[in-house]
Image: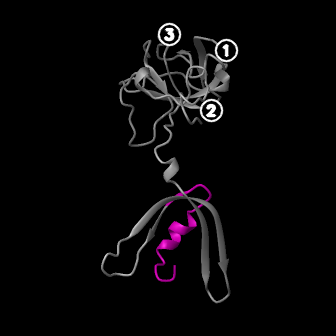
Amino acid sequence: MASNPAVMATALGLGFGTRAQVNRRPPSGPGATQLSIQTFVEHLSWAGDDQGNLKLALQLTPAAPYLNWWVMSSLHTAVATASTAGTATVMLAALTGSASNPASAVLVPGTVLTLSYGTANAENLTVKSVATTVAGYSTVAVTFTTNTTQNHSVGDVVCQPLPSGYQLPAATAAGFPASLDGGATLSVAGPRAAY
């Protein structure tokens, strides 16, 4: 790090599970090429002395076996009953995993949802409470901390807000990937990861 002090900020940001690219730059010469490998940080060890020397030792695991392995998605459903502006409770269609789980197992108070994603009426609201349901439910009443400011039509997509720069492929529930199948299970044929 002494030869490149700017790397200190990057090194300080490393932690368990961080994905890091390691580059080996061989001495210049015929056939010398840089080698790069994608890794995950498994262990960090810092050592320093009173002479100003600081060393960082990393234990890394190749990331290659796990790259492009899973597709994560945010919670999604649709508006089940039309809702008018000024309403705090909205009826939503069943959530992912409804065949095996009550709605409260998937949606908890404090979760932020975007109602009517992809439309001019889209708005973000925070969940206050989720009505009691049993496995196999088809709709669930969700109460928000504030009233809606827009009208929401049957079938409008409801999802968690997406990170900046990401967009659903289509503003339809069918076009939105799921991390769990209808029974909220992981199987060899089904999804391989969930959150």
The kind of residue tagged 3 is Thr
Q: In which quadrant of the rendered view does residue 147 lie?
A: top right
The span shown in magenta is 1-20
Magenta stretch: includes residue 192: no
> Residue 156, how many percent across, how many down?
43, 18
Q: Which mark is residue 81?
A: 3
- Residue, disc 2: 110
* Distance between the alpha carbons at the discs numbered 1 and 2: 22 Å
Q: Nearer the viewer, mark 1 or mark 3?
A: 1
Q: Which mark is residue 104?
A: none
Label 2: state its secondary structure: loop
Q: Residue at x 44, y 12 (%)?
A: 154
**Do residues under tags 3 and 2 come within 8 Å of each other at their CB atoms?**
no
> Residue 102, how many percent across, how many down?
67, 19
Q: In which quadrant of the rendered view does residue 112 lie?
A: top right
Q: Is residue 171 above or below residue 80?
A: below
* Front-lying residue, 14 or 87: 14
Q: Residue at x 48, y 37 (%)?
A: 71
Q: Nearer the viewer, mark 1 or mark 2?
A: 1
* Distance between the alpha carbons at the discs numbered 1 and 3: 20 Å
Q: Which residue in the rendered view is the most extreme toward the bottom?
A: 51
Q: Main secondary structure of the magenta part?
A: loop
Question: Left of 77 or right of it: where is 29?
Answer: left
Q: Which mark is residue 135?
A: 1
Q: Residue at x 45, y 41 (%)?
A: 163
How dense is the environment of label 2, judged by Cα within 10 Å: few (below 14), some, or many (20 and up)? Answer: few
